[in-house]
Image: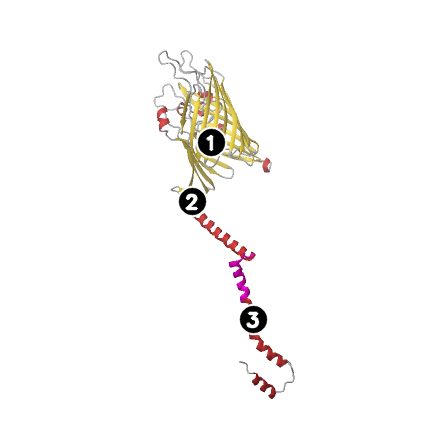
């Protein structure tokens, strides 16, 4: 209780000369009451949002806070998932003994094929053959053939290491399952076959490659899913054998600037001397090229332009840009007596991006004794022997192929092309061979792959022109 009498006694004993002390005294009594009212009001205001969130629609500020909280929770969940994926990927990486990471790839491919007439190989025909001889007792085996094959399945790997001898080191390899000598064993239990195995050292202007690769003068293949083990247009203009070699590339300089810049380079290679022939007295099975005891030598001058220098693959057709090259080949064979027979060739190749998703590629050459490089001379080095001769004349030929490829959609690539090989001299068993092919590759969804190809082959020999057709339907899984 407030004692007003005490205040009155004090006022009577003291002379009040001003009204200000009286108002200050009254104000001190109202201070606790005002503070209490303010506290109650603040409490009520703080309880209003809580009541609204329980009984009515949320206010905008509460919505934003809830949304931010939800986004934060989702972000934390995604970060946790990403950490888990990175941990899994790190644990599944393949590392070599040298602690270098090895990147693996594979294409599991099943080819269904149908060949209409007699051919060199019904699975991947290179040239047509005369119909089989019909027996009076057993009749004819026929020329048609069909089957399924997984032998064109491929797998490989690659590594890359920086700062090695002042440059960059890289290596890759690829193998398939097209090995073996007998048809039954190759079909039921296809053995692996090494295709390419290369090691690279790259400096600012120089590249050194050691390993097995296609010939330097014919370093380009047509695109195809039906002819991977033996590339399309083999024996019809395409030299493709994967031969051990040492190759050096040296940049000469650049003409122009930007997208119009042309990069010039010169290349040289020493290749294992493989010819596919034997000396008549050979007892060890050693190739006539090796018996010459000299390497095959090749050289090439190339010009590259545009931003897309790498060749197109079965997954992507490059943009504008490309490469043109001119090459030469020289080799030696010991096939008769103690003398050496020379093998030679001059070549030209081109890969030109006409526009976005449209590319033209091809090769052409003229030479002699080129069977060992991959089917040159329609797979022939010498013609039929004449009277009293052990070996026929060395065959010279002119050959080439051309293919146009288009990326119709990101998942769809189609192309068509032709190749031909013509032998000029001697008595060849096959005088001319022409092959044309149309292909399509469709990737409906990763990692699935579907392809189709039709190939027509016409081969001219002493007995006339023989023809065959080849259909191939491919199903693949790319890993």
Horizontal and vertical percent position of residue 69 = 50, 55
The tag on residue 37 is 3
Q: Main secondary structure of the magenta part?
A: helix
What is the secondary structure assignment of the residue under circle 2? helix
Spot occupied by residue 50 in the image (x, y as percentages of width and height): 52, 61
**Circle 1/circle 2 CB separation < 8 Å:** no
Give the answer, above or below, for where 478 lies relative to 293: below
Residue density around tag 3, few if under 14, some if 14–19, many if 20 or more, within 10 Å: few
Can you identify the residue that label 2 sits on? 89
Furthest residue toward bottom = 13
User: Closest to the observer: 70 or 255?
Assistant: 70
Estimate how packed mark 2 is, as few (under 14), some (14 to 19) or many (20 or more) residues with alpha carbons within 10 Å.
few
Tell me if mark 1 has few (under 14), some (14-19) or many (20+) residues whose alpha carbon lies within 10 angstroms of its own.
some
56 is within the stretch colored magenta: yes
Is disc 2 in contact with disc 3, using a CB cutoff of under 8 Å? no
Residue 154 located left or right of residue 48: left
Precedes in sequence: disc 1 or disc 3: 3
Callout in the foreground (1, 3): 3
Residue 450: give its label: 1
Q: Is residue 47 magenta?
A: yes
Earlier-in-chain disc, 2 versus 3: 3
User: Looking at the image, which residue is at 64% across and 81% down?
Assistant: 19
Of residue 316 and residue 63, the one placed in the foreground of this image is 63
**Magenta region, residue range:** 43-59
Residue 470 drawn at (x, y percent): 46, 23
Q: Earlier in the sequence, mark 1 or mark 2?
A: 2
Residue 158 marker: none
């Amino acid at each position: 209780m407030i004692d007003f009498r005490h205040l009155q006694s004090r006022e009577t004993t003291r002379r009040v000369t001003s009204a200000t002390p009286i108002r200050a005294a009254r104000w001190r009594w109202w201070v606790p009451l005002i503070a209490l009212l303010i506290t109650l009001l603040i409490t009520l205001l703080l309880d209003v949002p809580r009541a609204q969130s329980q009984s009515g629609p949320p206010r905008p500020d509460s919505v934003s806070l809830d949304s931010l909280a939800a986004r934060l929770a989702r972000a934390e969940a995604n970060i946790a998932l990403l950490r888990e994926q990175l941990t899994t990927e790190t644990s599944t990486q393949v590392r070599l003994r040298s602690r270098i990471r090895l990147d693996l790839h594979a294409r599991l491919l099943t080819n269904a094929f149908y060949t209409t007439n007699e051919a060199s190989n019904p699975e991947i025909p290179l040239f047509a053959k005369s119909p089989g001889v019909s027996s009076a007792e057993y009749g004819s085996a026929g020329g048609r053939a069909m089957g399924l094959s997984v032998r064109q399945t491929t797998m490989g790997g690659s590594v890359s290491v920086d700062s090695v001898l002042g440059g960059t080191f890289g290596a890759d390899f690829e193998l398939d399952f097209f090995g073996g000598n007998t048809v039954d064993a190759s079909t039921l239990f296809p053995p692996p076959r090494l295709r390419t195995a290369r090691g690279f050292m790259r400096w600012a202007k120089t590249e050194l490659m050691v390993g097995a690769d296609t010939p330097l003068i014919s370093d380009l293949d047509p695109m195809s899913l039906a002819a991977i083990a033996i590339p399309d247009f083999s024996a019809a203009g395409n030299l493709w054998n994967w031969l051990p070699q040492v190759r050096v590339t040296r940049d000469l300089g650049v003409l122009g600037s930007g997208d119009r810049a042309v990069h010039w380079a010169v290349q040289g290679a020493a290749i294992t001397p493989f010819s596919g022939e034997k000396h008549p007295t050979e007892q060890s099975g050693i190739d006539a090229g090796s018996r010459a005891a000299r390497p095959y030598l090749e050289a090439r001058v190339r010009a590259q332009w545009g931003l897309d220098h790498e060749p197109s693959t079965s997954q992507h057709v490059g943009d504008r840009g490309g490469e043109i090259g001119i090459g030469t080949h020289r080799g030696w064979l010991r096939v008769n007596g103690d003398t050496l027979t020379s093998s030679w060739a001059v070549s030209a190749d081109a890969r030109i991006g006409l526009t976005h998703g449209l590319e033209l590629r091809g090769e052409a050459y003229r030479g002699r004794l080129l069977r060992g490089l991959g089917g040159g001379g329609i797979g022939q080095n010498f013609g039929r022997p004449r009277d009293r001769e052990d070996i026929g004349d060395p065959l010279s030929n002119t050959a080439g192929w051309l293919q146009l490829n288009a990326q119709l959609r990101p998942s769809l690539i189609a192309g068509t092309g032709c190749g031909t090989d013509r032998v000029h001299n001697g008595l060849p068993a096959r005088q001319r061979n022409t092959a044309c092919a149309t292909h399509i590759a469709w990737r409906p969804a990763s990692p699935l792959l579907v392809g189709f190809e039709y190939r027509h082959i016409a081969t001219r020999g002493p007995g006339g022109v023989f023809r065959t057709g080849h259909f191939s339907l491919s199903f693949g899984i790319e890993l």
